[in-house]
């Protein structure tokens, strides 16, 4: 196996200056893209519908291989049945060997279409994986060995969700996988098309791209294998097939996005090893809160709420149960939260840096008010010191011992949460909403600007858990990317940039728009939407 070197001749002083420049660029981007009560971050001003990017990447003239479909209605075909949603947090399902069937299902239950929606005048697709504005910037590529029924040789492919198929970009010479990688494995790589989200959200879109990417990690929380730290030269010799389709007639370039994307690239760290911690089950305080839904039913039927009804109430035990599944370390008797032991946070392979400020609106048995979930308890003393001195930091009544949830201040936060989330009713009309508060500049200082996207990756995984939990207990949820950054910090008493709000979320009873009709995911209409 030949490895190409990405290292270059650079002095220690030049490296320090480069790191400083990247750090400053990242902080500048984050500050520049904040929303304020008096001014929003720069956006397109209006939506140019004639140039909306095609949501489906295709490679023209690349061979397309159709994958197997697995409708939920046919789940009885699986030997041993499909596990209930709540059970996968207690023990991991047994792994499957790689076959045409298991390979197909992997993509069907993570990246495929889940439905089509139509009003009669317009039609659009939904996917298993959520995305800000349903814009889906993320593309998936696969490097795999020969798989019976799929390919007689190893291959590099692009996943086409509309077709639920693989576009074969190149064939890999025989023996390559045997020399380079462990048996019974394949690789999935993600790339993102910035323009798909920048078309709507402008310069702030770079933040949303990270969230969307890590929601996929929430699905694909499987053991990651060691791979070479530098590119394998043989890939440059492959015969590549297919040309990418044109996504829109015109393309607006947001320079700050591309400049910052360079600043946050992770450098090559020689000798770095990826260690997957042992699995730890999550805590249980109200298993009866969950509907009798299989994990596939929850994953494929999850939907993002457009409006909340303002009346649905959940019991505090259900609220506590949802939050127990939001903890990175699971239920470990006597140990602090912080390490990524629980599903799906094991996919992150680093300590938690994200907490949650919760606005509780409609939870029976729990007073309305502002609460805080400490997801890394090593930050507890620092958080308490950084936030308002009048906050009580009381454990709420009936709260499980292993749930680090604290009541900060009682009171009706409905209007406050709406105002903070760009005056959106959905933030106050649910059962609860929250802001995800990251341990920000100290993390960037200690590790590098490359941690900036990884902070958003963690908020994306946390958001994915909330999406699935909401559906599993019979309600709904949606992410909120539009919020006033510094006013959130002011409410909490946070000053400076040690802690920053990165993403908001709301959970509650959805309003169903009866004017919209659902259609099956496959076969879908012959449109790109």
Image (cartoon, helix red, strand yellow):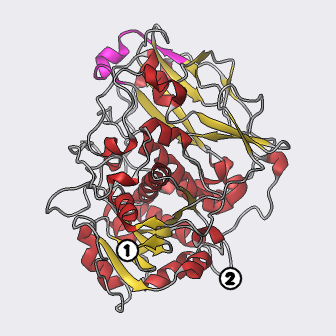
Callout 1 touching callout 2 (CB < 8 Å) = no
Residue 259 location (% of width, % of height):
57, 57
Seen from the viewer's position, the closer of residues 127 and 2 is 127
Is residue 442 visible in this depiction of the protein? yes
What is the count of numbered marks? 2
Q: Residue furthest bottom?
A: 390
- In the picture, measured across the screen, residue 427 lies left or right of residue 467, that is right
Look at the image and give the residue range highlighted in magenta.
170-185
Q: Which mark is residue 372?
A: 1
Residue 306 is situated, as x and y percent measured from the top left of the image, at 66, 58
Of callouts 1 and 2, the N-terminal one: 2
How far is the residue under mark 1 from the one under mark 2? 28 Å
**In the visual, does 134 lie left or right of 383?**
right
Q: Residues within 10 Å of mark 1 (few under 14, many from 20)?
A: many
Looking at the image, residue 147 lies above or below residue 397: above
Front position among marks 1 and 2: 1
- Judged left or right of residue 301, residue 199 is right
Examine the image and state in which quarter residue 7 appears.
Answer: top left
Question: Which SS class for mark 1?
Answer: strand
In the rendered structure, the answer to whether residue 176 lies left or right of residue 49 reads left
Mark 2 neighbour density, 10 Å: few (under 14) some (14–19) many (20 or more) = few
Q: Which mark is residue 348?
A: none
Q: Quadrant of the C terminus?
A: top right
Is label 2 in a helix, a strand or a loop? Answer: loop
Image spot of residue 40 (x, y percent) = 67, 73
Which residue is under mark 2?
38
**Residue located 61% across and 69% down the image:** 310
**Camera-nearest residue between 242 and 341:** 341
Tell me where residue 224 appears, x and y as whole percent: 32, 36
At x 67%, y 57%, the residue is 254
Q: Is residue 453 visible?
A: no
**493 shown above or below 455:** below
């Amino acid at each position: 196996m030949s490895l190409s070197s990405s290292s270059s001749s650079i002095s220690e002083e030049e490296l320090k200056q480069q790191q400083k420049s990247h750090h400053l660029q990242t902080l500048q981007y984050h500050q520049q893209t904040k929303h304020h009560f008096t001014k929003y971050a720069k956006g397109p001003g209006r939506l140019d519908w004639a140039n909306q990017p095609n949501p489906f990447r295709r490679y023209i003239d690349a061979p397309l291989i159709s994958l197997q479909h697995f409708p939920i209605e046919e789940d009885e075909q699986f030997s041993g049945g499909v596990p209930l949603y709540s059970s996968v947090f207690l023990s991991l399902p047994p792994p499957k060997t790689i076959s045409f069937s298991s390979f197909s299902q992997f993509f069907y239950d993570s990246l495929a279409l889940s439905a089509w929606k139509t009003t009669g005048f317009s039609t659009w697709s939904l996917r298993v994986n959520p995305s800000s504005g349903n814009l889906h910037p993320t593309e998936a590529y696969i490097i795999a060995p020969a798989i019976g029924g799929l390919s007689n040789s190893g291959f590099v492919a692009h996943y086409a969700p509309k077709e639920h198929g693989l576009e074969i970009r190149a064939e890999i010479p025989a023996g390559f996988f045997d020399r380079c990688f462990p048996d019974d494995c394949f690789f999935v790589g993600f790339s993102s098309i910035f323009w798909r989200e920048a078309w709507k959200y402008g310069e702030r879109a770079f933040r949303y791209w990270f969230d969307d990417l890590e929601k996929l990690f929430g699905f694909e929380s499987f053991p990651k294998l060691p791979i070479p730290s530098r590119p394998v030269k043989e890939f440059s010799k492959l015969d590549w097939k297919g040309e990418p389709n044109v996504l829109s007639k015109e393309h607006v370039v947001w320079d700050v996005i591309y400049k910052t994307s360079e600043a946050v690239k992770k450098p090559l760290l020689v000798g770095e090893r990826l260690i997957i911690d042992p699995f730890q089950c999550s805590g249980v305080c109200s298993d009866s809160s969950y509907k009798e839904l299989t994990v596939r039913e929850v994953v494929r039927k999850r939907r993002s709420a457009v409006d909340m009804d303002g009346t649905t109430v959940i019991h505090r035990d259900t609220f506590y149960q949802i939050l127990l599944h939001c903890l990175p370390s699971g239920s470990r008797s006597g140990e602090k939260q912080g390490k990524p032991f629980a599903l799906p946070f094991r996919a992150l392979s680093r300590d938690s840096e994200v907490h949650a400020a919760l606005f509780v609106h409609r939870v029976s048995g729990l007073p309305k008010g502002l609460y805080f979930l400490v997801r890394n308890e090593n930050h507890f003393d620092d958080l308490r010191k950084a936030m308002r001195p009048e906050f009580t930091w009381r454990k709420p009544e009936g709260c499980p011992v292993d749930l680090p949830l604290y009541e900060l201040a009682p009171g009706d936060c409905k209007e406050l949460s709406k105002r903070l989330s760009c005056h959106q009713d959905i933030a106050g009309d649910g059962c609860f909403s929250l802001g995800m508060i990251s341990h920000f500049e100290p993390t960037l200082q200690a590790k590098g600007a490359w941690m900036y996207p990884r902070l958003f990756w963690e908020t994306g995984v946390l958001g994915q858990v909330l999406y699935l939990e909401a559906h599993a207990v019979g309600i709904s949820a949606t992410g909120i990317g539009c919020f006033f950054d510094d006013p959130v910090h002011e409410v909490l008493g946070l000053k400076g940039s040690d802690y920053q709000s990165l993403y908001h979320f709301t959970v509650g009873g959805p309003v169903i728009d009866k004017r919209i009709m659902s259609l099956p995911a496959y076969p879908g209409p012959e449109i790109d939407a």
